């Protein structure tokens, strides 16, 4: 059976040929970066610098202020815990992933900070007003996603950035679902800190992420350790990227990320957005006349290529398990974003359709056809199929 991946919002699969080649080459050729002056260390350092330069150029950031991390969660924790101080207040949105919600909630529970949740509206002007209304004299940061990982809704991130600059507030943006899909620029869009995954829309391997900063708000390190620089000092170096990069870097991941961005540049961000959005529209159109399927999109709202839906008469996990048996991989559940599902009223979560550069119209239509068949089966055998599906879990 052919397996088709529509779970690309979690991790893009398959990876481009040049990424697979870069990984194989990195395993065979590179060692440790910044550790020694011998030939292997030097060529590894050169490759890592080139990868860092490639990322920085892609997002219009400075090379030295581009930090490699383990993933977007790691990058967000560095930013959140690295700039906040006791007594600070922060604002997050009601669509946040747990990589923002949990560290903020943990700091609040420890009595170190306070936070407010701004409601996201279908109307960008109303959303902006909600963020503005939550600002206090001690508000230190606004931390929010650029695009929801549940519905794909794009927040007015440029306007939020401008609002933050007007009030001297740090804007930390979660670009996990937007980087590689939207034409983001650290400088042009006004973000102070942009965090993203390397393994999603940038097509790198898992275990890769990036933090980029304009240095307007200094970030204190969460860890201290070997950097290959200033080794005599018992203190972490003051300069970036060394200050926030401790221990051996993911050299293979850096090589993959460099190759992934080259792939995105060749296909163009605009081209990838058009292709994936067209598949989302095709998917929605194919299911539009099926009342048993609810699609969580609203007219007039801008989305990245993600579609969340539910099927009446079946839990998201049960429906996704049935689709998996048909050869389709989609993620069901809360997607690590309980705030977003609380807002939607989907207490059991949804099923998420997320195409990639390699997704095809034919597979999208086959998925829609399988869902239609599933609805018909539920109508005829409803409870029996649901029990069977539950047993599979």
Image: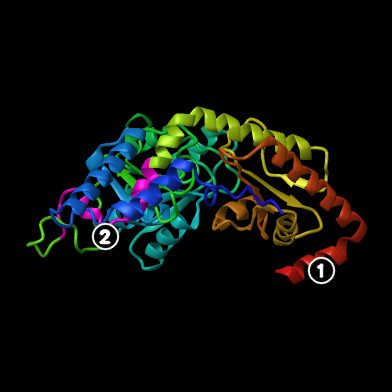
| Residue 98 placement (x, y as % from top left) | 49, 58
Q: In the image, what residue occupies the spot 50% across and 51% down? A: 96
Q: Is residue 390 left or right of residue 38?
A: right
* First of labels 1, 2 by sequence position: 2
Residue at the limit of the structure toward the front, as seen here: 28
The quadrant of the rendering that contains the N terminus is: bottom right
- Based on the picture, tell me whether residue 209 belongs to the magenta stretch: no
**Dot 2 corresponds to which residue?**
248
The residue at the far left in this view is: 232
The residue lying furthest to the bottom in this view is 391
Q: Give how far apart the Cα atoms at labels 1 and 2 are.
A: 49 Å
- Given this view, does label 1 or label 2 mark the residue nearer the observer? 2
Question: Please, what secondary structure does the residue beneath circle 1 have?
Answer: helix
Residue 278 place in picture, x, y as percent: 64, 31
Residue ID at (22%, 47%): 43
Asked whether the viewer can see residue 79, the reply is: no
Magenta stretch: give its range: 236-258
In-front residue for pair 251/200 = 251
């Amino acid at each position: 059976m052919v397996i088709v991946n529509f779970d690309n919002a979690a991790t893009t699969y398959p990876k481009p040929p040049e990424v697979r080649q870069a990984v194989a080459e990195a395993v065979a050729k590179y060692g440790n970066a910044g550790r020694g002056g011998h030939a292997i260390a030097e060529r590894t350092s050169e490759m890592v610098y080139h990868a860092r330069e490639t990322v920085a150029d892609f997002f219009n950031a400075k090379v030295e202020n581009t930090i490699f991390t383990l993933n977007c969660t790691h990058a967000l924790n560095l930013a959140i815990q690295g700039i906040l101080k006791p007594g600070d207040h922060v604002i997050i949105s009601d669509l946040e992933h747990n990589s923002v919600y949990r560290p903020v909630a943990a700091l609040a529970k420890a009595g170190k900070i306070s936070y407010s949740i701004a409601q996201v509206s279908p109307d960008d002007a109303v959303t902006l007003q909600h963020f503005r209304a939550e600002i206090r004299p001690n508000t230190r940061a606004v931390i929010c996603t650029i695009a929801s990982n549940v519905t794909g809704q794009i927040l007015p991130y440029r306007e939020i950035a401008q609002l933050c600059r007007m009030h001297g507030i740090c804007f930390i943006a979660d670009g996990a679902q937007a980087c590689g899909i939207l034409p983001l620029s650290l400088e042009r869009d006004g973000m102070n800190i942009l965090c993203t995954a390397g393994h999603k829309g940038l097509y790198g391997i898992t275990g890769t992420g990036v933090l980029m900063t304009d240095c307007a708000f200094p970030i204190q390190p969460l860890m201290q350790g070997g950097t290959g620089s200033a080794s005599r000092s018992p203190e972490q170096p003051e300069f970036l990227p060394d200050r926030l990069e401790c221990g051996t870097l993911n050299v293979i991941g850096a090589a993959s990320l460099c190759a992934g961005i080259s792939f995105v540049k060749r296909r163009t961000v605009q081209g990838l957005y058009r292709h994936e959005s067209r598949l989302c529209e095709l998917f929605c159109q194919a299911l539009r006349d099926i009342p048993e399927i609810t699609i969580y999109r609203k007219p007039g709202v801008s989305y990245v290529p993600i579609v969340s839906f539910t099927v009446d008469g079946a839990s998201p996990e049960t429906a996704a398990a049935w689709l998996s048996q048909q050869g389709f991989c989609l993620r069901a559940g809360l997607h690590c974003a309980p705030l977003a599902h609380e807002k939607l009223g989907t207490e059991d979560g949804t099923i998420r359709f997320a195409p990639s550069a390699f997704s095809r119209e034919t597979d999208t239509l086959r998925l829609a056809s399988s869902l239609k068949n599933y609805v018909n089966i539920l109508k005829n055998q409803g409870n029996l199929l649901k029990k069977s599906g539950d047993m599979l879990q």
